[in-house]
Amino acid sequence: MKHIVVGVTGGIAAFKACQLVSDLSKKYEVQVIMTQNAMNFVHPLTFETLTGKKCLIDTFDRNFSYEVEHISVAKWADVFVVAPATANVIAKFAHGICDDMLTTTFLACKAPKVIAPAMNTNMYENPVTQENMDKLRGLGMHFVDAASGLLACGDTGKGKMADVEVIEEAIEMALYEKPLAGKKVLVTAGPTQEAMDPVRYITNHSSGKMGYEVAQAARNLGAEVILVSGKTALPCPYAIETVDVKSAADMFEAVTSRSGDCDYIVMAAAVADYTPAVTADEKMKKKDDDLSVELVRTKDILKTLGQQKPEKQVLCGFAMETQNLIENATKKLTGKNADMIVANNLKVAGAGFAHDTNVATFILKDGLVENPLQSKEDLAYAIWDQLIRIGKEKGNE
Ligand code: CTP
């Protein structure tokens, strides 16, 4: 289990650090370090109950196992998060000041750092604070920008700590090696909507979860990611350029206008194969007779990309089948000139739409890879293992 150190400093946003620590404790081992000022907002007992670990505050605490604690905690951390980070603590970090447990451990820690500032707008925008943040960014620390809104001091402006979910995504990013650093990745996700009139459309059950996991994994592995997404209920992922589209034609345009310089493209979207021949301008009124709608084929995006694929580009498609999985998916691999097809059988328990799990077989030019039932998140990393291997074989280092 990975180790996360969470530093909490004295701002009202410290109350949100409780949710952050609670969420992180479900996935990681978490150690909280508080400043004295933070204790004015949240009691250490809250964090101790959530983490099952003594909250560290005092560098000279006599009640500890005999280790030089700020050094041992600094070495233990896989990621060091500071949320909320006040203007004061950012200034101290920027100047190497270590006058308490938090700042001392921070200076001693070589792990990736994630800092979520929270303060009054004027303090945030003050060039001194901006310069301090720029300096720390330049040293490789990751800032999760403060959001705008109504602040506790009554002002409206920038300075609200970013949402906990966003900070969690930034922590995920910090936890991974970066084999995709410098690479450009395009992922499609979700269903398309094919309009019949201004009110009705034809769509499918895709939730977008698989494609979003593939995009987020690519981002965590260091890639610059563009996500072209049909309508889903999922939040816009952190640090990913998201392009919202509706129809298969919109998706075709959004993808083909961006695909040229991409190193990897993963078509996880459930693109409609047919669209109404005519979209009525006005709402279609019902009649007594039955209604037939003429449907025409959409353009196959994956096939088009396969036909114009640059030499080093890696192209991955998906296939969802209910029968003859391998045979049908293999036809897609060759017919669309893809490098890999992720094939799943909708009828297998735990696979397919809307689940958090999937069971997939990778269809490759040189064989098959069967995968166990696993979370869509784990499957996304398994997909990247394969795609990165194929990329290396193509000389896309
Ligand atoms: N795809 C695409 N453009 C389309 C349709 C599908 O790029 N107009 C992509 C999907 O994103 C997916 C793969 O092609 O990666 C799925 O192949 P497809 O032939 O569409 O599968 P099905 O829709 O299941 O069709 P079939 O009836 O041939 O099984």
Image (spheres, helix red, strand yellow):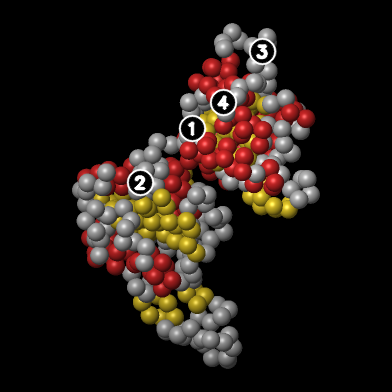
Towards the viewer: 24 or 140: 140
- Kindly identify which residue carries mark 4: 96
- Kindly identify which residue carries mark 2: 182
Report, in whole angstroms, how far the alpha carbon at label 3 lies from the one at label 4.
Answer: 19 Å
Towards the viewer: 120 or 58: 120
- Kindly identify which residue carries mark 3: 60
Circle 1 residues within 10 Å: few <14, some 14–19, many ≥20:
some
Q: Is residue 120 left or right of residue 163?
A: right
Circle 2 residues within 10 Å: few <14, some 14–19, many ≥20:
few
Position of the C terminus, as image quadrant, is top left
Report, in whole angstroms, how far the alpha carbon at label 1 lies from the one at label 2.
Answer: 19 Å
Report, in whole angstroms, how far the alpha carbon at label 4 lies from the one at label 2.
Answer: 31 Å
- Kindly identify which residue carries mark 1: 112
Give, as a three-letter code, the residue at label 2.
Answer: Gly
Q: Nearer the viewer, mark 4 or mark 2?
A: 4
Q: Could you say whether the residue bearing mark 4 is in a helix, strand or loop?
A: loop
